[in-house]
Structure formats: C-alpha cells, structure tokens
Image: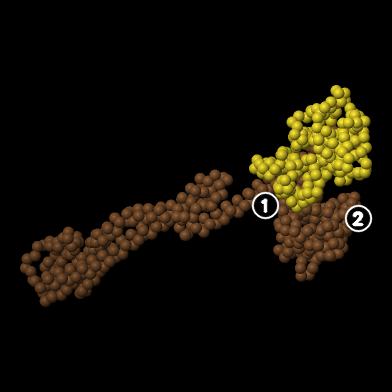
C-alpha cells in the first residue's frame, strides 16, 4: 500500500512517517501543498493523509484539485482545524475521514486501515480468499488454517494483488505500492517477492500475465 | 462611574445659578422699584407740601382752623402737618400733635432737617401775615415708597416661582438626552461594544458620544485581536501536542533499542519545542501588555554581546561563523531585557535559517545623521519579498521555514520594536546574500553617544 503523507510539521511528520513504515506502508512525505499537488498528479496512491494548514497551497485546495481530477483515492484529513464548519468543509470537499490534532497514533492507523479496506470494497478486517484467510490488522495469513510466515514486503505484494482480484498489476504498479521515493529499488525486487509468495502459497495462486504483470484470479 | 469626589451635577449647577439669577433679578427689580417709588414719592410729597402751603396762603388768615388738621389719608398716604405763624411770631395754626411738632424753621423753601432723631422735610413760605410751614415725615415717605414699590414688585415676585418652575422643567428636559445616554451606557452588557446611537442627541453631546464610540471601536479591535491571539495560540499548541503524543506512542511501540533511543530523542526535542513555544507566547504577551519595565539608558553594544553569547552554542553546533563587523559603543533608551530579547530573536532566526558552515554578521552603527542602527545579516536563503509584509504576523511561517520555529520570533521583535519606536527593515544582504534585518532607532529614542 502506498500512502502520501502531507504534513508541514517536522516532528509530527517524522514520527508518523516512521510508524507508517513500521506498518509496512510505502510512504511519501511532502511538506507543502504545492508539492502535494504535484505528487498526487504524478503518482498513484492508495491513501492520502492530508494536513490542511500548509505552506504555499492550503490542504483544502489540494483536496479540491484532487477531486476535480476525478481521483477516488481515499483522503484522511488530519488537522488542527477543529471547528464544526471546518470539518464539514473538509468532508464536503471530498475527504473520506477527518481527524483532529492532537490525535492518537493507534486511531490514525486504525482509520487508515478502515479507509483502505473500504476502498477495496471490504467491510471487515478479516477476509478470506479461496483457501487463504487474511487479517489486515495483525497482517497474518492463514493457509488452510495454518499460519504462513510472510516478510513485510511479501505481505505488501500479496495485499495489493488480493485487494483487487482479477486486476492485472504491472511490475511498476507493484513497485509503486512497495516503495516510497527514497527507497532503493532493486530492478527485480518484485520478482523476488512473487517467487517467495509462490513458494509459500502454491504456484498457481499468483499468475503471471505475459508482458502485462501479475494477477490473482477471481475466485 | 465610581469617582464621586469631583463629580458635580450639571443639572444642579444650572438650576442653582439660574435660580440665583432669577432671585437676584427679582431683588434688584424690587430695589429699583423702591428707589423709583421713593423719588416719585419725594417729588409728589414736595409738590403736595408746596401746594398745601400755597392753598393755605391763599386762604389766610383762616380765622378758625381745626386745631389738629391731619391730612393723612389711606389713599395717597401723604402725611403733612401744617403750622402758621403771624408776624409777631405767634403760632396761629398747628395741625400736628405737640410731640411731633417741628419748630419753626428759619430758611424759606424746602429743607430736610433732623428733629430729635427723625428726618423731616420742611417747606416754609412767607406771606404778608406771617409764615406758613408744611412738614412731612421722611419715614412716612419711605413707608409710602415701600408700599408703592411692593405694589409694582408683587407681580414679579409672584411670577418668580412660576419662572423657577419653568426653568427647572426646561433644564430637566434639556438634560434628558444626557440621562438617556448615561442609562444606555449603564445598562450595557460588559461585552456589548456596539456604538451608542447618535440620533436624538444635541450637537453638544455628539462629539462626546463619537469619542466614546471611537473608544469602543478601539477596545473592540483590541479585544478581538486578543481573542484572535488566544485562538491562534490554542491552535498552534495543537501541533507540538500532537507531536508529543505521537512521539510517546512511537516510543511505546519501539521494538529495538535504537528505535527507542531515537524515539526518546524525538520526545525530548518535542518537549523542548513545546517549552519554547510557551516561552515565546509568554514573551509576546508581556511585550504586548501595556505595562513594562522602566526605560533606562542601555549600552547597546553590551546587549549585542549578550545576545550573541545566547545564540553562540547553537551557531557553533551548526558550524556557523557568527560575529560582528563593527560595534559602536552607543547607548539607547529602552528596557534592557526586552532589547536583549529582540536581538536574541533576530540572531536566533539568522542562525536557524542559515545552512551549516554559513555566516551571520552583526553591526551596531551610530551614524551622525541617521541615528543608531543595528544590522543582522546572514548567508541563508533570505526572506522572500512576498513573505516580507507578513513575517511579523503571529504564527506566520514562510514557505521555506519548514515550520521549524514557533512563528512568533519576529512578532516578538516587532512588538518590542514598536514599544521602543524602533523601525525594522527587512532586506537582502548584499554581502552575504541572505536576509538582512536593520533596526533603526528613531529620533524619539535619541541615541546618547557615550563612547569613551
């Protein structure tokens, strides 16, 4: 899952960034509205955590631009603006959730999970796919009821594919979900993770579509 | 409203003086009437006396005259007594009682005599058979004049209470707008600072009401800026609090010692940041409050040395070369602690926004014409011209500042500068390429050159 963190406060930003990475999200952190707008225009994210009081361009304007471009990416506003009107303004501008500072880290993470879940059309943290069951909170995978040990990167690849069964994801798309800007990307990293997953889950679970990418077939 | 010592009532004062004037007027009127009546009574009495004497002369010798002929009547009030003597000096006629009888007066015509302590008017006329003397008591004249004067004054005296009543009413009516305005102010809720209505007020009261309204306006402005400040401060406190909370939770979730160490470092930095923000808020509140420390003569060069030593450790940490180009030994009038804080905030900003291995340079110059000026320049990114008008706003951070500071440093600088009549100029350092901030100590703050 690739997230965009828009936060101008250095201290908040670095801690949230660390904690999100800890949760195996690929996170890009930008610190002003104009850069956020550029990032959203050029990259695809699974979720945006948006502060509103930003230098250069206000967060609300960033959000409006984003929605004007028909993007459906979930947006979680995390701001110090706590007025009722401001919350309404934010939600009406297209935000999916609104969190007021100072917020709790666990709540932030839970809301991120909830938003991601919903954006993939699921309403529960636990879901099953064929003979696999996924727990998106504990990041556990059970194969026929037996836990499977996955590395965080393997989990990330699997989660991206299982999120939209039947959708073919290219290697670049998967890389995007795995790595933030600052990470070093090994050219065949995705292949390595796919290989690992096949070994643990069985060869036919993730299928290769030649010249296009990978897919988890619809059950 | 609690100051009762020097308070006087306009209404009472007006009424007092108007009443006094009316009373005095009535008294003067009565006095003048009396004087006029007295003159007239004199004239008439004299005329009567002469007339009487001539009448008697014409009819003399009247062989028989009533011994006591009192010509006093209630109507005219002339109290004349007549005596006549023949040529032998024998009194042939006497109308007055022996007690009030006036001895024969040797001078012809009118004269005023003092007979046994009473003033008497005497008219003496000679005829072929002797002398006729008509006498008239001055006191009776006075009584008569009083009577007449009273008669003319009565209407005025009777009118006076009516007049006073009228004046009282008029004063009350005229002063009612003041009372109404007072009631309006008195009935106000403490937070109601809407302007007082001007309609229905006399032009004499309008300037006062306008001044009150303008004061209300200033108070409202001041209050709203205070409220804004509190709102801003509360808002600004959220960020460091959010950071603290996240940092604590980050520390709780840390899984390795390295993570925990880093989380601890961040937490401490977060606490320092909150502390600094609160200190800055306090400093700003103090600088913007009306009271302050007394103004004394301050050695600016010495203050600059103190301020530089305040930021020196931070500059060293960041390998920034901080120093002075030129320091004049000058004194200015001001509050030493406030001025030191001003300089420290400027230097703090300069060091903070200058990249490592950069340069920060200060100078204190005492120009002969321009007065004292202090310059702080650095080799940082400078302050963008678009930001310049707003950098003094509370909590404003330039786009390039990275939200490092509290956004209050320059607000504090401005507040102190305003209080000291110092002009702050933001420019670009031609030598170092970064920001250049110049403080101009204006003429209201005359420099006292005491270089020794």
CA gap, disc 1 to disc 2?
A: 41 Å
Q: Outermost residue toward the bottom?
A: B128
Say which of A77 and B49 sits in front.
A77
Q: Which mark is residue B357?
A: 2
Q: Which is nearer the N-term, disc 1 or disc 2?
A: 1
Which label sits on residue B290? 1
The residue positioned 75% from the left and 34% from the top of the image is A121
Query: Cβ–Cβ below 8 Å for labels 1 and 2?
Result: no
Question: Where is residue B80, by image quadrant?
Answer: bottom left
Q: Chain of mark 1?
A: B
- Chain B colour is brown
The chain displayed yellow equals A
Up-down relation of residue B251 to residue B159 (above or below): above
Q: Residue at x 90, y 39 (%)?
A: A190
What is the residue that sits farthest to the front in this orientation? A210
**Residue under mark 2: which chain is it in?**
B
Judge the density around disc 2: few (<14), some (14-19), many (≥20) Cα neighbours within 10 Å: some
Quadrant location of the N terminus of chain A in the rendered image: top right
**Nearer to the camera, A207 or B409:** A207
> Where residue B287 sits: x, y (%)?
72, 52
């Amino acid at each position: 899952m690739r997230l965009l963190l828009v936060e101008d406060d250095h201290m908040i930003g670095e801690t949230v960034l660390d904690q999100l990475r800890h949760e195996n999200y690929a996170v890009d952190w930008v610190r002003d509205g104009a850069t956020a707008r550029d990032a959203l225009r050029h990259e695809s994210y699974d979720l945006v955590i948006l502060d509103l009081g930003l230098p250069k361009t206000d967060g609300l304007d960033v959000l409006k631009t984003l929605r004007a471009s028909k993007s459906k990416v979930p947006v979680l506003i995390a701001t110090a603006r706590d007025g009722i009107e401001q919350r309404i303004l934010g939600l009406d501008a297209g935000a999916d959730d609104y969190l007021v500072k100072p917020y709790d880290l666990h709540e932030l993470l839970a809301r991120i999970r909830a938003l991601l879940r919903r954006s993939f059309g699921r309403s529960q943290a636990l879901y099953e796919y064929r003979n696999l069951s996924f727990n998106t909170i504990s990041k556990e995978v059970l194969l026929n009821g037996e836990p499977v040990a996955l590395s965080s990167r393997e989990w990330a690849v699997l989660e991206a594919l299982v999120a939209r069964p039947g959708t073919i994801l290219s290697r670049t798309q998967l890389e995007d979900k795995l790595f933030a800007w600052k990470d070093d990307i090994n050219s065949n990293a995705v292949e390595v993770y796919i290989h690992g997953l096949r070994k643990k889950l069985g060869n036919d679970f993730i299928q290769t579509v030649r010249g296009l990418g990978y897919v988890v077939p619809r059950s | 409203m609690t100051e009762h010592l020097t308070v006087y009532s306009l209404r009472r004062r007006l009424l007092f003086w108007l009443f006094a004037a009316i009373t005095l007027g009535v008294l003067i009127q009565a006095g003048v009437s009396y004087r006029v009546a007295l003159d007239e009574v004199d004239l008439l009495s004299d005329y009567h006396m002469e007339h009487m004497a001539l009448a008697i002369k014409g009819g003399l010798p009247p062989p028989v005259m009533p011994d006591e002929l009192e010509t006093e009547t209630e109507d005219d009030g002339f109290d004349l007594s007549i005596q006549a003597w023949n040529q032998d000096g024998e009194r042939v006629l006497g109308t007055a009682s022996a007690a009030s009888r006036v001895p024969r007066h040797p001078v012809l015509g009118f004269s005023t005599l003092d007979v046994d302590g009473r003033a008497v008017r005497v008219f003496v006329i000679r005829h072929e058979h002797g002398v006729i003397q008509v006498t008239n008591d001055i006191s009776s004249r006075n009584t008569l004049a009083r009577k007449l004067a009273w008669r003319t004054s009565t209407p005025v005296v009777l009118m006076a209470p009516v007049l006073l009543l009228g004046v009282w009413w008029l004063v009350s009516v005229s002063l009612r707008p003041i009372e109404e305005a007072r009631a309006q102010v008195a009935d106000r809720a403490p937070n109601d600072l809407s302007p007082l209505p001007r309609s229905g007020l006399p032009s004499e009261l309008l300037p006062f009401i306008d001044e009150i309204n303008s004061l209300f306006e200033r108070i409202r402005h001041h209050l709203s800026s205070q409220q804004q400040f509190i709102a801003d401060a509360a808002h600004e406190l959220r960020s460091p609090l959010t950071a603290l909370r996240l940092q604590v939770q980050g520390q709780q979730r840390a899984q390795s010692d390295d993570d925990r160490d880093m989380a601890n470092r961040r937490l401490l930095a977060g606490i320092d940041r909150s502390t600094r923000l609160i200190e800055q808020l306090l400093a700003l509140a103090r600088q913007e409050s009306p009271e302050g420390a007394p103004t004394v003569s301050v050695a600016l060069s010495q203050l600059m040395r103190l301020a530089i030593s305040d930021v020196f450790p931070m500059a060293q940490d960041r390998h920034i070369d901080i120093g002075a180009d030129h320091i004049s030994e000058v004194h200015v009038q001001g509050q030493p602690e406030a001025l030191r804080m001003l300089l420290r905030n400027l230097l703090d900003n300069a060091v903070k926004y200058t990249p490592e291995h950069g340069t920060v340079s200060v100078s204190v110059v005492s120009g002969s014409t321009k007065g004292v000026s202090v310059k702080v320049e650095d080799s940082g990114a400078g302050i963008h011209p678009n930001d310049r008008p707003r950098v003094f706003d509370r909590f404003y951070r330039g786009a390039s500042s990275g939200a490092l500071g509290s956004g209050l440093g320059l607000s504090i600088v401005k507040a102190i500068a305003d209080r000291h009549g110092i002009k702050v100029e933001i420019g670009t350092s031609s030598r170092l390429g970064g920001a250049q901030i110049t403080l101009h100590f204006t003429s209201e703050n005359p420099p006292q050159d005491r270089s020794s």
